[in-house]
Amino acid sequence: MSHVATSNASTLSASRWPIWTGRTLSGLVVVFLVMDAGMKIAALPIVSESAVMIGWTADPGFWRAMGLLLLAITALYAWPRTAVLGAILLTGYLGGAVATHLRMSDPLFSHTLFGVYLGIALWGGLWLRDARVRNLLPIG
């Protein structure tokens, strides 16, 4: 089993396309999360309107704090040295979004599972760009 993990990691490290694909995928996730955090920090009306629709407070102070938290966690994910910690924390954050949409009986594939899709992209990008994660999770 460990031989498979070693050969898998060495095969991927020999090729540059997984690293660039992972960086691109991670970059798309970061852009989306920074945009989301920015909307919360700027207290755009759509944030409070959407919050009320899904049963959360419309208080702009709360959403600014959530935006700053999301921005900080996203920065951890974007920085290679702390990317795994950021991915773990973002997984928890996205889990809260999934739970909220599930509680509201929102459409499954478009709303409720969106956080799952984002989490898969987040971890997939990290797996492709970081040999340590590939060694930890020898998939494929």
Image (cartoon, helix red, strand yellow):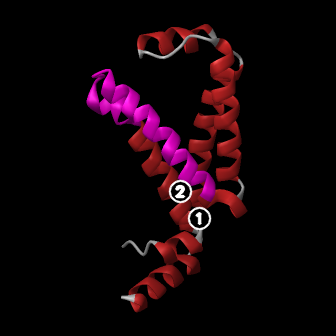
Q: CA distance from mark 2 to mark 1?
A: 6 Å
SS under mark 2? helix
User: Contact, CB < 8 Å: mark 2 with mark 1?
Assistant: yes
Q: Mark 1 sits on what residue?
A: 129
Residue 56 is situated, as x and y percent measured from the top left of the image, at 48, 17
Q: Position of residue 17 (x, y in %)?
A: 55, 66
Q: Is residue 86 left or right of residue 128?
A: right
Label of residue 53 in the image: none
Q: Residues within 10 Å of mark 2 (few under 14, many from 20)?
A: many
- Main secondary structure of the magenta stretch: helix
- Residue 52 sits inside the magenta stretch: no
Q: How many marks?
A: 2
- Measured as percent of width and height from the top left, residue 85 is found at 62, 57
Quadrant placement of the C terminus: bottom left
State which quarter of the image contains the N terminus: bottom left
Q: Which mark is on residue 125?
A: 2
Q: Is residue 91 left or right of residue 100?
A: right
Residue 116, given in percent of the width and then of the height, sits at: 39, 43
Stretch of the chain drawn in magenta:
85-114
Q: Residue at x 51, y 50 (%)?
A: 122
